[in-house]
Image (spheres, grey):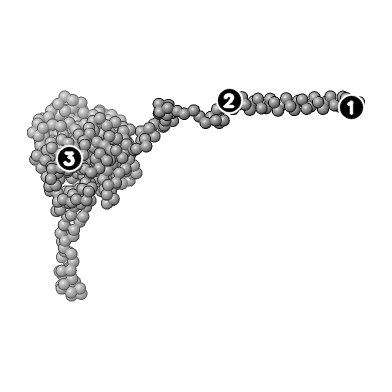
Amino acid sequence: MRFPKLSRSLRQLSSHVLAIALGVMLTVSTLQVLPSQAEPAPPMTAGDTSKVIAQRQSPTTAAIGSTSFVTAAVNRVGTAVVRIDTERTITRRVDPSFEDPFFRRFFGDGFSQQMPSEQQLRGLGSGFILDKSGLVLTNAHVVDKADKVTVRLKDGRTFEGKVQGIDEVTDLAVVKINAGNDLPVAPLGSSNNVQVGDWAIAVGNPLGFDNTVTLGIVSTLKRSSAQVGISDKRLDFIQTDAAINPGNSGGPLLNGQGEVIGINTAIRPDAMGIGFAIPIDKAKAIAVQLQRDGKVAHPYLGVQMLTLTPDLAKENNTDPNSPIQIPEVNGVFVMRVVPNSPAASAGIRRGDVILQVDGKAITSAEQLQNFVEDSRLGQVLQVKVQRGNQTQQLSVRTAELQNAS
């Protein structure tokens, strides 16, 4: 009776032993498949290490690296970026009522004399050194009408600046400082090579915080001054999301290699992450003229204009309250003709649609403006306009624009 029980016990024991053995075998086999968990990994060569790093780095990490390319870019140009402080004295007219005997009876004869008749205004901007002789490029609105200009270098040295030339139309100015012939110079790139998505590094003195650097990308190219909201300028801006604030004006916008691709100029107060810079290729040409002549001559026609499309014209024409019917064509609609301007002398009228200039089709106001800007002073342009149902060919001789506004 006891042998069957013993036999069953032996069989159960054998099963347990077999299970334990199988478990040990599976554990050993698993450890052999995952050696990194069981023993130190074999040493790697330098080539293997570089391959692993290259595989694991994201594009952003690879671009920035352990030593930031921004640091290298700023180090390349940083000492050539300057702070520009300006002072301007304005005279206030004393209200004539202060001289009234009735007023003087209550406040005394000396009250009007205590009223300040002059006020000093201070401004702040940025700029960068173009050559070792001390030429500084900045914005016109930074130094315009300033009585005193002070240029401060990054090393703390300050120099009195002399404004050599201002061009309000492109918002550029050249300032000269006498600081010897061994000044740091900002390396200039080419804005023609800039593409949307490129790195953009803004350097300057925003809100008085000297030597400030912000990073972003080029958001778009050839953003017209009319689109930006400053129609009195003739510029196609580089748009960037690198932070630009008051005081950045005139400072450089750099590419990833530390080359100047633009001059920080404008911001939109109603938006965040939208700033604008003057392309450096445009600035180079203007700077040469300002250094040589102190000003830049800009040809003009003398019309206020609007880009016209057939859809816009049709929308106007179907409005029963519209005071005028517009040809449903592509062109530039003349909203106003400036009195005594070349356009007025040539017979261009309000309501005309400019279709061609010198045989080239004109489809936008920006295109027409650029065409005129690239012409010569006194050049006769053959302008084809549509007036009602008829077309006319008019000869317009360009003249010099006397005022940016």
**Can you give x and y, in whole percent of width and height, for residue 283 in the image?**
18, 37
Indicate left or right for 274 with 403 as reference: right
Identity of the residue drawn at 10% across and 37% down: 399
Disc 3 residue type? Leu
Query: Mark 2: which secondary structure?
Result: helix
Quarter of the figure with residue 92: bottom left
Q: As rendered, which of 372 and 210 lies closer to the eye?
A: 210
Query: Mark 1: which secondary structure?
Result: helix
**Cα distance in 3D space between marks 3 and 2:** 67 Å
**Mark 3 in CB contact with mark 2 (< 8 angstroms):** no
Which quarter of the rendered picture does the N terminus lie within? top right
Point out the tag, 1 or 2, that comes first from the N-terminus. Answer: 1
Identity of the residue drawn at 20% across and 26% down: 361
**Can you give x and y, in whole percent of width and height, for residue 293 in the image?**
9, 40
Can you identify the residue that label 1 sits on? Answer: 2
Disc 2 residue type? Gln
Can you identify the residue that label 3 sits on? Answer: 130
Point out the tag, 3 or 1, that comes first from the N-terminus. Answer: 1
Query: Mark 3: which secondary structure?
Result: loop
**Cα distance in 3D space between marks 3 and 1:** 109 Å
Which quarter of the rendered picture does the C terminus lie within? top left
Specify whether residue 5 is in view.
yes
Number of marks:
3
Q: As rendered, which of 349 and 158 lies closer to the eye?
A: 158
Can you identify the residue that label 2 sits on? Answer: 32
Disc 1 residue type? Arg
Is residue 105 depicted above or below 162 in this figure? below
Specify whether residue 394 is in view.
no
Quarter of the figure with residue 372: top left
Q: As rendered, which of 290 and 297 lies closer to the eye?
A: 290
Indicate which label's residue lies in the foreground, 3 or 2.
2
